Structures are given as structure tokens and as C-alpha cells.
Image (cartoon, rainbow, N blue to C red):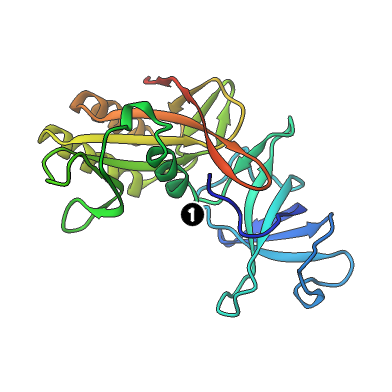
Amino acid sequence: MPSFSSPLIKGRLIRRYKRFFADVELIDSHPGVPNSAIDAEPPVVVAHCANTGTMKTCGDPGSIVYLSWNPDPKRKLHFTWELTESPDGGLIGVNTARPNAIVAEAISSGQIPSLKGYSSLKREVPISSESRCDIGLDRDGSGKDICVIEVKNATMKLEHAIAFPDAVTSRGLKHLHELSRLASEGVRCVMFFLVNRPDGEIFRAAHEIDPKYAKALREAAACGVELMAWRTLNTLTHAGIGSELNVQLD
């Protein structure tokens, strides 16, 4: 299971702004973090937010959040927003730099039964002159029996479902069109939604937010793209794959 490089630091979200910044008031001890990295009382830090979506239902001011700390002098911000605590105390993975590694490790360790049997796994594999897929699998190294996988981090809860996307996504739409094209040519393609929170009973497209994406997802499935949704098991030390969810197409 992918692990955090340092113990996570507990805080309370004050605000997220300019998409990539979050002000967080620390409410727990912070061993290893120098006082110079923290403002005077109350202890407030600026954390990097890797999530480019709206973070609906996982980024409300006042939420309990968990930050990682990286003292690398090349980094402008040494804190990174990793997790948000859900109302029931569960942990939501909001750092979108992590899902590909979580899925890749789950595949490599045989935790995804339908993706077993491939001899090689590569990350960031070119699939056209302009696009790359998140994960590429090859059955025997010949390049003839391959599987192309695109991974999306799903964290928005709408009633009993976890839905994606939480904002209109032209990039996500492009990825679906690429997968549909490849599937139509006979390539095995998987759209993999990492449901990065412990609640929600099913996965579905957020048609009320991005109807074009929801339509493209239905079309992709009709072209032969396999739709998978698996839940993460988040703790304060690591993240791994849990159970599979049903995908509901509108």
C-alpha cells in the first residue's frame, strides 16, 4: 500500500483559494516541523492543494483535514493537503497526485481480479501524438495484448452515490473520447474511478454538473470501454484498495 512519507498533521480548514492554496489552522502536535514554518498563535499554515476540482463535499471550511510535511527547500509550500475527515469520521483522499500510484500498486499486487495476468505495467504511456494514459498493461510484452487505463479520483457525494466530475472537465471529456476511439479499434480500455471516500453506495456520472461528460461515459461504455469503480481504504499512514462498487449509467 502506498504510504505517506511522514506522519500526517491534523488541522482545521480555514479556506481554500486560488485553487492551489489552503489556509489550515493546526489543532494537533506537529513533531519535526520547525516553528519558522508556522505562523504565531493561532498556528496557521498555507498548504498546497493538488486537487483542481471544486472539492464539493470534501473541502468545506471548518472541516478536519490532514497535511503531509516535506522540508525540501525546492518546494514553495512544504505542507500538502492529503485527507479530509468526512462527517462520520471517515477519511477522504483529496490529493489527486496519489490515485495513479494506488491503482498501479493494487493491479501489481493482484487486488483487481479483472486486471490480473499482465506481465508489465507502465505509467504515463503515450496513446496518441497528444495524449497519454495513466496506466498501460501488456500481457506478454509483444504490444499486441494490451490494456489502457485512465484513472479519476472521485470524492463528491450526492445522496447515496459518489459522483464524478465535481466540475465541468474538458480534459476528462478528451480522455473518454480517446478511450472510445481505442476501444473501437479493438484495444482493451478501462475507465477506472477511484472512489476515495468510505461512504456512498454506488458510483455514477455527475450529469447535473457535466452532462457532456455523462453522455460521453455512456457512449464510451457502448464502444466497449470497461467502467470500474473501486473504493480506497484510507488511514493516517497509508492508502490501499478496498471493495468494488457498482457503476450506474443514467
Q: Amino acid at mark 1?
A: Ala
Where residue 89 sits: x, y (%)?
A: 74, 34
Left or right: 123 in relation to 204: left
Q: Name the residue furthest right.
A: 41
**Vertical side of 92 occupied by 28: above or below:** below
Label 1: state its secondary structure: loop
Where residue 42 sits: x, y (%)?
A: 88, 64
Residue 207 visible in the current orientation:
no
Left or right: 60 in relation to 161: right
* Residue closest to the eye, 245 or 177: 245
**Vertical side of 122 occupied by 231: above or below:** above
- The quarter of the picture where the C terminus appears is top left
**Vertical side of 104 occupied by 200: above or below:** above
* Residue closest to the eye, 166 or 136: 136
Where residue 147 sits: x, y (%)?
A: 23, 38
At 75% from the left and 74% from the top, the residue drawn is 37
Residue 249 visible in the current orientation:
yes
Location of residue 130 by image quarter: bottom left
The crowding category of the residue bearing disc 1, from other C-alpha atoms within 10 Å (few below 14, some 14 to 19, many at least 20), is few
- Reading the image, the residue beneath label 1 is 97
Where residue 153 sits: x, y (%)?
A: 47, 42
* Residue closest to the eye, 211 or 250: 250
Left or right: 25 in relation to 138: right
Q: How many marks?
A: 1
* Residue closest to the eye, 48 or 215: 48
At 50% from the left and 48% from the top, the residue drawn is 53
At 69% from the left and 34% from the top, the residue drawn is 90
Location of residue 169 by image quarter: top left
